[in-house]
Image: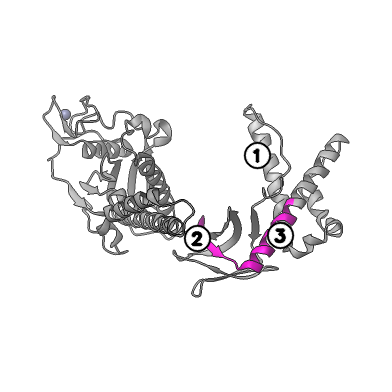
Amino acid sequence: MIISYKYPIFPNKITQWKLAENLDACRWLYNRILQDLNDAKEKGIKLKTYDTQNKIPSLKLENPKLNRVYSKVLQMVNYTLWSNIKGLAASKKNSRKIGHIRFKGYGWYNTLNYNQSGFKIDQDHGVLHLSKIGDMRIKIYRKIEGCIKAVIVKREGERWFAIVQANQEPQPLSETEEAVGLDVGLTSFVVDSVGNEIENPRCAKQSADKLARLQRRLARAVRGSNNYKSLKYKIAKLHKRINCQRDDFLHKLSRAYVNNFDIICVEDLDIKGLKEKGHNNGMHRSIHDASWSKFVFMLSYKAQSAGRKLIKVDPRNTTQRCSACGSIAEKDLSVRVHECPYCGFSCDRDYNASRNILITGMEQPVAPIEPKPLHHISVMQVLAMTWEAAPFRTR
Ligand SMILES: [Zn+2]
């Protein structure tokens, strides 16, 4: 299973210049091969991937700058163009309205793909070495596990990143014989079917307050002044810290669920989307939704590599149905408590939903249960979780 990590890299001025030159040489190659393909098509000649690849050495005579690019990177330019063409052919088949493959204008080619070879990463000292380019600092804040298959250097505006692709062997965990259903909370992040309620990471209130304070100061500062620049820098830095912390939270929480449960059931939000679930209140909604998607993605690959099962269930009626008797008890967004008019079962609305998600995922019949109070877990508790111990209920 291939896992991608994205890290910022910090090439110095000379290295940046070399990278930019490499990118432009690749852009030239991309356009040149595309031109060849178009010409061949007009003449009714059908070319294959290796035909254009075999042409690269002769193109080096035409543009000597190609000699300064690592050979495998050039091959990947050819490969990328062909996969774009195949992608286009596939969407043509699905009769979507599409154009044709475009030539890349200046500045529109932004990735160098070091596939299989031409790179070295020193994780302990944070150094990335690229053939034909040199060394640069790489900030590895999450250790790379597994065998590294490729390094893709990416330019995003003024910043540079390395996307590291590693192949991880599955490491099955021993069975726990427990299953759990997870519901996206309305105010909390997750409420699960064993009664844990996980605080929403946006509630890392300290950071949010600090950010709001800085933004107010920025609004008052004189545009372009040193104070303005310094505030902008501080805000960007804080944003980054908040994002890193949120990712750390999602990693630890998904790890805890995968370690403690054989089967994890979640709603399949591809079917309906979060918005239609009635989640549309509050300005942090989109952040919450993005975090939830990321969380489910982390659950899925962690579960796969641990030999666990992630089941996505149809989200219809998970909120409205009574998880004790199966009757439909209509409720709108403001109603926080599920109270069944048919069997009298009463509990937190998200807890009821998570039980329904579990029941549907496990294809179990509904059954009456003893209601229990939710076990609240704070963001800080999640961040402090270790591999062995999670401070939450597992049954
Ligand atoms: Zn009921």
Q: Earlier in the sequence, mark 2 or mark 1?
A: 1
Q: How is the image coloured?
A: one colour
Residue, x 43% and y 35% (percent of image)? Answer: 270
Q: Check disc 2: other Cα within 10 Å, few if <14, some if 14-19, many if 20+.
A: some
Q: Which residues are magenta?
A: 1-27
Above or below, 140 against 243 in this view is: below
Left or right side of 344 for 386: right
Residue 299, visible in the rendered structure: no
Residue, x 80% and y 48% (percent of image)? Answer: 32
266 and 188: which one is in front? 188
**In the image, which is nearer the foreground, mark 2 or mark 3?**
3
Q: Which residue is mark 1?
A: 87
Above or below, 213 against 283 in this view is: below
- Give percent across and percent down for residue 68: 75, 65
Q: Earlier in the sequence, mark 2 or mark 3?
A: 3
The answer for how far apart the CA atoms under marks 2 and 1 are is 27 Å
Q: Which residue is mark 2?
A: 168
The answer for how far apart the CA atoms under marks 1 and 3 are is 25 Å
Q: Which residue is mark 3?
A: 22
Residue, x 74% and y 49% (percent of image)? Answer: 30
**In the image, which is nearer the foreground, mark 2 or mark 1?**
1
- Give percent across and percent down for residue 187: 25, 41
